[in-house]
């Protein structure tokens, strides 16, 4: 992944217009400006670097196809986060369906490989094992809210747009998720507080 660069709205609008006019370098610049964050959100929500790369790639394919229909007032980064979250949700549903039909004996090696790859990706992202484990313990909606708020640095209204939940619901999920994380990370004896 290339290093993320920040673009302001004027630069973004210019790159979008140039991309619509067929300038491939302009679209490449849009991708370079957002690819680390999009991949980061995907790997944290999916826990699998290969699936995260596929989700990130699909998000940019959808961006390319949708450039002409993006609303001028919508922030491109918010749009990309919403698409990425939805792609990750779709992947979770696909995996749940596949689990129903997978023989448990044959699933073991596959799960071990996915777990090892996820651990390596999280090390690259400089997340320690306790934080990762605590995040994994959170309910899906709280985990999404925490990842989007603190790792992607989105506002509550941007998270609301990305997830389809109201800003108040997002704030509640962040609050409850932070309390739960604090409880999980603060327990020295390894006992976990029951989810409420």
Image (cartoon, rainbow, N blue to C red):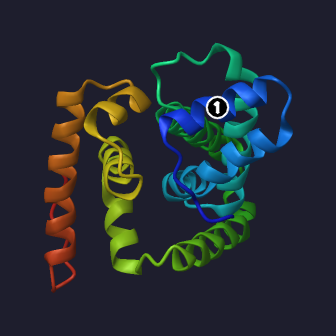
| Count of numbered circles on the image | 1
Is residue 93 visible to us here?
no
- Residue 136, x across and y down, in percent: 39, 61
In the image, what residue occupies the spot 15% across and 78% down? 187
In the image, what residue occupies the spot 68% across and 35% down? 15
The answer to whether 115 appears left or right of 187 in the picture is right
Q: Nearer the viewer, residue 189 or 128?
A: 128
In the figure, 106 relative to 113: above or below?
Answer: above
Is residue 115 visible to us here?
yes
In the image, what residue occupies the spot 40% across and 31% down? 163
Disc 1, SS: helix
Residue 173, quarter of the rendered image: top left
Residue that extends furthest to the bottom in the rendered view of this protein: 189
The answer to whether 167 appears left or right of 54 in the picture is left
- Residue 80, x across and y down, in percent: 56, 36
- Residue 42, x across and y down, in percent: 56, 51
Residue 155, quarter of the rendered image: top left
In the image, what residue occupies the spot 75% across and 39% down? 27
Q: Nearer the viewer, residue 38 or 139?
A: 38
How many residues crowd around disc 1 within 10 Å: few (fewer than 14), some, or many (20 or more)?
Answer: few
Quadrant of the rendering where the N terminus is positioned: bottom right
Q: Which residue is mark 1?
A: 14
Q: Nearer the viewer, residue 179 or 78?
A: 78
In the figure, 50 relative to 139: above or below?
Answer: below
The answer to whether 151 appears left or right of 20 in the picture is left
């Amino acid at each position: 992944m290339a290093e993320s660069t920040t673009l302001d709205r004027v630069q973004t609008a210019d790159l979008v217009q140039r991309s619509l006019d067929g300038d491939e370098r302009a679209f490449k610049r849009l991708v370079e400006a957002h690819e680390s964050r999009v991949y980061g959100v995907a790997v944290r929500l999916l826990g699998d670097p290969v699936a995260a790369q596929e989700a990130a790639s699909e998000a940019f394919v959808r961006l390319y196809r949708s450039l002409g229909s993006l609303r001028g007032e919508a922030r491109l980064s918010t749009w990309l986060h919403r698409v990425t979250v939805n792609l990750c949700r779709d992947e979770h549903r696909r995996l749940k369906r596949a689990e129903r039909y997978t023989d448990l004996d044959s699933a073991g090696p596959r799960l071990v490989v996915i777990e090892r790859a996820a651990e390596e990706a999280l090390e690259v992202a400089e997340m320690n094992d306790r934080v990762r484990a605590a995040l994994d313990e959170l309910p899906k909606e709280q985990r999404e809210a925490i990842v989007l708020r603190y790792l992607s640095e989105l506002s509550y209204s941007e998270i609301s747009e990305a997830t389809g939940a109201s800003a108040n619901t997002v704030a509640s999920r962040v609050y409850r998720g932070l309390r739960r994380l604090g409880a999980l990370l603060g327990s020295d004896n390894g006992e976990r507080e029951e989810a409420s």
